[in-house]
Amino acid sequence: MKELIVSTCEKNFIRQAVSQGKRLDGRKFDDLRKLDIKYGLEWGSCVTTLGSTKVVAQVSCDVQVPKTSRPNEGLLFINVELSGMASVHFESGKINDAEVKINRILEKCFRESKCIDLEALCIVAEEKVWNVRVDLNILNYEGNVVGCCSIAALAALAHFRHPDVTSTGEGIIIHSEAERDAIPLTIHHYPVAVSFALFDQGKHIIHDPTALEEHVSDVQLVVCVNSYRELCGLYLEGSSIKTVDLVVRCSSQAAKIAKRLVDYVRDTLQEDQNVRNSNMQVPGLVSCVNEDSLFALSQERLIIKLTDRELQEKIKELTTETEEKLDVEMKDCSNEDMKIVSTGPSSAELVSNLDVKVGLGDKNAWMVDEGGDYSSESENSEVELVQEVSRHEKVIQLELSGDSEEEEVTVLKPENLEQRDLSQKLPKKKKSGKK
Amino acid sequence: MVSEDVKVGHFGREAIVGSVVLPGQVVEEASSAEQKKVTLGPGVERVKENIVVCNSGILKKSEPNIYYVDNLQKRYTPVRKECVIGVVTMKAGDIFKIDINSSEQASLSYLAFENVSKKNRPRIEVGDLVYAQILSASKDMEPELVCVNSYGKQVTMGVLPAEGFLFQCSINLIRKILSPECPLLSKLGKRIPYETAIGMNGRIWIKAKNVDATLLIGNAILASEYASTETINEICDNLLKKLPNV
C-alpha cells in the first residue's frame, strides 16, 4: 500500500460537508487543532503533537569538514522518517514520496531561508565546522504532518545547544558541559510551515487539514512564513489554482498563524528555561509518557464531533456527571490510590494519586547559574525589537558586505535621523557595526 | 475501559484475568486447567505446556474457558466468518483486491455474489465499499472474502451505496454496539431514519438523510465507547432533543 485508501463514499461525504461549511471534527475552517510541545532532558529534543499527529524531534551535532564552496559555514541537515508506525500505509525501509516531500519543504523552510546563522557554526575555516542534524520521527500520521514537523524542528533547533570550542592554534578543544556552558544556535528568524487544503477551486480554504481532508482536497498548499510575515517557501500540490488572489490570501492568513505558532514555541521554550533555571527537576519527556495513567500517549478517539456548541456542552455535562458517579463508586471500593480525571468529552482517565516516580533521574545542578544571559533576555527583547524594525523597514537598512563584523554597514536615511533612538534597542552586534 | 474496572500495575510472571497484561506473561489459570478444554482467542498462544500472552492489552475470559486479549490496534487481524467492510483498491482480472485494514489486502472473486455468472458480472468500481464475510483467514495466505452465505444468498452483504460516510473505531466499540443489550442503534433509529453497516474490522458505514444526521449518529456511536447503558440512553435523548430538523 503506497497511499491512504479512501473510498468514494468518504470523498463524497467530506466534499458535501465542506460545501455546507462543516468539518468532521467540528472545527471551523480556520481552526487549528491543539498544539502541544514537550521538551526532553537533553538539549534539542522535543515531542510535538498537533491534534493526533505526533512528531519527535532530536537535534544533534558533530564536527565535519565544510563544503569547499562555503568554507566558513556550518552544515544543517534535516532528516524526516515516516515509518510503518506512523500509519499503516507506510512501509518501513523504503523511501517514500511523502518523506521526500516533507524533507524538501523543511529544507526550504529552514536551510534556504537562512534562519540559522551557519557562519556562527564555523570552528576553523576550511577545516572544521559544526554539522547540525535534525532528526524528525513521525509517530502518528493524522494530517498536516509538514506543519507539525516544522514546529517540532523549530522548537528543537531553538532549544538546542552545542558545546563550546576553543582553538589552540594547533587543534581545537571541545568543552564538555561541565567545563563550559553550551551555546545556543543563533536564529535570525523563526519560520514555520502552515498548510491548507483547498476545496471547490479555492472557494473553501481549510486550515490544518486532517489526513482525510488532505487526501480528498483539490489543492494542498503549504506556505512557509516567519513571524515577521516574510515568505520563506511555498509548496503547491494537486490541481492548479485558478483565482489570482488565492495564494496572497492564503499567505496572509499563514502569516497570522505563523505569528501565533512562533509565540507559542517561544512561550514553551521560556517555560522550559524557567524550570531549568529554578533549580527544579526538569520533567523531560517522562511527563508525556505517564506511567500511572492508563491512557498515556493515547490518541483522541472521538474523530467525529458536532459543530453545535450547545450539543457539545450537553454531552460534556452528561459525561462529567457520569464521571462523578464513577468517582463515587471508586471511592466506595476504597480504592483511594486511583482517581478518575476527565480528559475531554466522553472520556475519562484513571490516574494514580500516589506520587510514583520511576526513572525520573536526579536533579541537574549544573544549569543553575546559566541564567538569562542569552536565552531569556535576548529572545524576549528580540521579539519586540524586530517588530519595530519591520515597522520602520525603510528607515534602517542593514547591509552585510562581508564575513567579519567590522565590515557591517548601517545606512540611515537622513530624514529619519530622529529615530536613532531606535538603534539603542538593537542588539550589540548591530551596534558595533555602525560607523 | 475505565468502566470495566481494570487493574493496573501487576506485571509479574502471571497474567491475571481482567488486568493489563504484557507479552510473555503466563496465563496460569488456563495452563493448569488440565481436563477442561481451553479455547484461545487473539493475543494468547500456546508455548509448550504454557499458555502465554503474546499481545499487550487486557486479558479477558468468557465461559467456558475462552481466553483472549482485548487491545487497541490500528490493523485488523482477519478472522473466519466475521463480516467486514472493505474498500475496493484494484480490479485484477477475475478478482477484486479489497482493503480490509489488515496487513494484506483481501481478495474477492467476481463470482462470489448472488445471481452472477461469467457473462453477468457484478458492477464494482475502484473506491467502492463492500460489505463481505471472510471465507478464509490463514497465516500464510491472503484473506478471501465472499458476498454470499452458504446458501448462495446475498442477504445483507454486497456493494454499499456511494452515499453516507465511513468511519473508523475500535473493535471493542463494534462488539459493544452489536451486543443485544446495547440500546444505542435502535434508540437512534426511532427518531432518525438511517442505514448502517458495521464491520468487525472497526469500520462503520452510515447513511442518513443529510450530513447533520450522519454526523450525529457517528458522534453518538463514538461517544458511547466508554459509556454505560444508562449514559447511552441519556446521550441519545439529549442529542435527539436538541437536533432541530432531522
Image (spheres, helix red, strand yellow):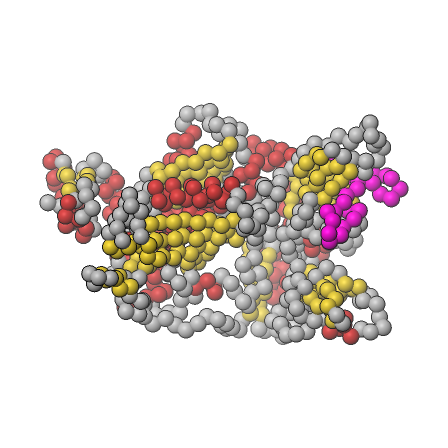
Residue B158, placed above or below residue B173: above
Residue A287, placed above or below residue A203: below
Q: Residue at x 81, y 35 (%)?
A: B111
Residue A260, placed above or below residue A283: above
Q: Residue at x 73, y 64 (%)?
A: B45
Instruction: From the viewer's perspective, tell me whether residue A15 is left or right of residue B90.
Output: left
- Magenta-span inclusion, residue B47: no
Of the 4 image quadrants, the one containing the C terminus of chain A is top left
User: How far from the left and from the top, in percent, is residue B201?
Assistant: 70, 49
Q: Residue at x 51, y 42 (%)?
A: A98
Asked whether the viewer can see residue A242, the reply is: yes
For the record, the magenta segment spans: B134-159
Instruction: From the viewer's perspective, tell me whether residue A150 is left or right of residue A229.
Output: right
In terms of secondary structure, what is the magenta stretch mainly?
Answer: loop
Compare residues A136 and A170 and report the one nearer the observer.
A170
User: How far from the left and from the top, in percent, is residue B125?
Assistant: 70, 32
Instruction: From the viewer's perspective, tell me whether residue A13 is left or right of residue A361.
Output: right
Asked whether the viewer can see residue B4, the reply is: no
Number of disc labels: 0
User: How far from the left and from the top, in percent, is residue B47?
Assistant: 73, 68
